[in-house]
Image (cartoon, helix red, strand yellow):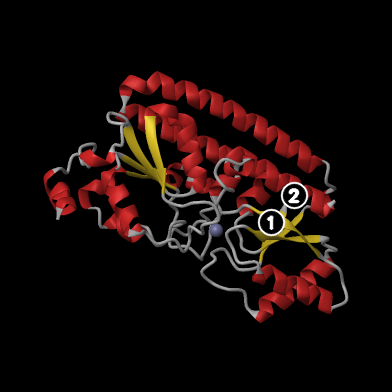
Amino acid sequence: MKKAVCILVLVGLWSCKDPNADGGDSGKLRVVTTTTMLTDLVQNIGGDSIVVEGLMGAGVDPHLYKASEGDVSKLFNADIIFYNGLHLEGKLVEVFEKMGAQQQKAVSLGDFLDKTELIGSEYFASNYDPHVWFNIQFFKQFAEKVTRTLSEAAPENAAYFTDNNKNFQKKLDVLEQNVKELISTLPEEKRILVTAHDAFNYFGKAYGFNVVGLQGISTATEAGVQEVQRLSQFIIDNKVKAIFIESSVPRRTIEALEAAVLDKNHEVSIGGSLYSDALGNAGTEEGTYIGMFTYNVSTIVNALK
Ligand SMILES: [Zn+2]
């Protein structure tokens, strides 16, 4: 009832707030994010002048994520919502659509990327592969857009956001340089990445890997027997040393593939678990975008060498 009144009466962009939900942070912008990658990004730009609430935690699969009642109330009480878009958060779109005028405060960061640079995909309603954060350049563009949006909403903090963005952009440049150096230590013919689902196409395109995902591009469809057979032959033909589990996808799909290769009397090992659609636990190195990216690349390079 309270929510309904709030929506009907206060349709203004920044005005629909629950006065009890501030928790001592009154006056600060309340920002809701979907994935852990975006939570980390927005925290880097907004610092302590905003309150960020991420809906999804570590190990959560955004393709399948459904909003809880608590989430819906967080969304309605937010000043700004940042989401990946491009149909990554497949089941949250319905919630955004029901928000009426409030929908204006929801920013789909993926929609601000140059579509001609995106990888097409028939699996998503957007017709694009949504796993864009695996190209660091795209993540940098997300940070620019977040900075502009926060600055418009809280002009008094614009200089602070701009400074934070500058620092973050520098760190992302260093990350990309490190990633390229690490990968350069791996011979080109060994740059083949076999994982549980196609989250790494942008990574492959940007940093020179041939990427093969077992499950198709969304985790909503499970790999069939035929697909496992086809891919196991590919692994043998290309002498792939290791394949990878993903933190947000059940490991049985990759284990089935490992078993199929071993059945054909060839060897392949599981090279480790990669972070694909979610970061590691908060408070750990892998709980940040930069730490996650570094961890993934070292794991891949060490296992394939
Ligand atoms: Zn995914």
Query: Which mark, residue 91?
Result: none
Q: Residue at x 43, y 25 (%)?
A: 161
Residue 157 in view (yes/no) = yes
Q: Residue at x 40, y 38 (%)?
A: 52
Name the element at disc 2.
Answer: helix
> Circle 2 sits on which residue?
299
Q: Residue at x 41, y 50 (%)?
A: 55
Locate residue 269, reporting x and y percent: 81, 63
Q: Amino acid at mark 1?
A: Ser
Locate residue 194, reporting x and y percent: 71, 61
- Callout 1 touching callout 2 (CB < 8 Å): yes
> Looking at the picture, does residue 10 appear above or below residue 232?
above
Q: Amino acid at mark 2?
A: Thr
Of label 1 and label 2, which has the lower sequence position?
Answer: 1
Kindly indicate the quadrant of the structure image that contains residue 12.
Answer: top left
Looking at the rendering, in which quadrant would you find the N terminus? Answer: bottom left
Q: Residue at x 69, y 48 (%)?
A: 296
Ligand 1 is found in which quarter of the picture? bottom right
